[in-house]
Image (cartoon, coloured by chain):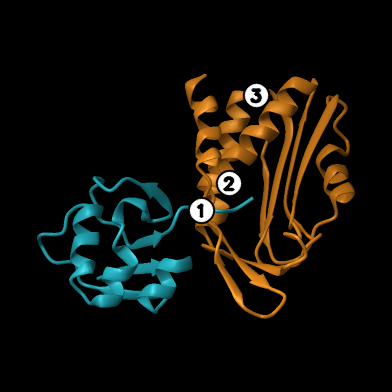
Amino acid sequence: MVKLVYFAWVRERIGKSEEEIVLPDNVSTVGDLLDHLKERGEEYRNALEHSDVIRVALDHHHSQHDAAIGGANEIALFPPMTGG
Amino acid sequence: MKPTIRVQSDDFEIATEIQILTAGNPDVGAVVTFTGVCRDEAGQLAALELEHYPGMAEQEISRIASQAGERWPLTGLAAIHRFGRIRPGENIVLVIAASKHRQAAFEAASFLMDFMKSRAPFWKKEIFLDGTEGGWVDARSTDEDALDRWLQE
């Protein structure tokens, strides 16, 4: 099981702030995960439609889409940040 | 030099934070502060709602601050970022950099702020006076460009 957490408009479009899922064997990178999530329903497709803008953090560390998920416990998906 | 990092909903008092950072340190010759404040947006904005990623927000700002500490000879560094509902005129973020000389303090404060804008996990949503939501503030490409000058040097 891996915990997924969502923020800002990714959270709003998916309709939940977090969930736990079992990663299928064919999901090894962040990009694989985004593709897998898009198959979970229309709300996921809406949220992840322009997946190139989606930012991902593995266990609180920014990660690229080609990064291996490895043994990450918490994966966060969110839009570009607008702090400061 | 251990940076002071805080993520909080409460406001901060700039003079107090400067005093905490510099008290009892005779090596401080320069203190630079940056305060980010919620703009009024032509009188239409009721507030900004700042969402953040608890845990990662503190960690990411700490990582950025550590890089600043390795790059410049600082005697003190503080970053405070607020979350929750923030009204026009209220503080959003505070950066304080202290050093022996001004150049390091100016540059470290600028570096920390540039990276916080694009790397610290915070998102702003606009709430208008008529109660409607103005939507999520878009990230600016100029903010991303601002990082390049630090990465190229």
Chain letter for cyan, please: A
Q: In terms of secondary structure, where does tag 2 sit?
A: helix
Q: What residue type is labelled 1?
A: Met
The residues tagged by marks 3 and 1 sit, at their Cα atoms, a distance apart of 26 Å
Chain letter for orange, please: B
Q: What residue type is labelled 2?
A: Lys
Residue A41 in the image: x percent, y percent?
A: 23, 77
Q: Which residue lies furthest to the left in this view?
A: A26
| On screen, residue B149 above or below B96 | above
The residues tagged by marks 2 and 1 sit, at their Cα atoms, a distance apart of 7 Å
Front position in the image: B1 or B152: B152
The residues tagged by marks 2 and 3 sit, at their Cα atoms, a distance apart of 20 Å
Q: In terms of secondary structure, where does tag 3 sit?
A: loop
Q: What residue type is labelled 3?
A: Trp
- In percent of the image, x 18 and y 71: which residue is there? A39
Residue A72 in the image: x percent, y percent?
A: 30, 57
Write down the residue under mark 2.
Answer: B117
- Residue B129, quarter of picture: bottom right
Write down the residue under mark 3.
Answer: B72
Residue A81 is marked as: 1
**Residue A42 located left or right of residue B9:** left
Chain at numbered mark 3 = B
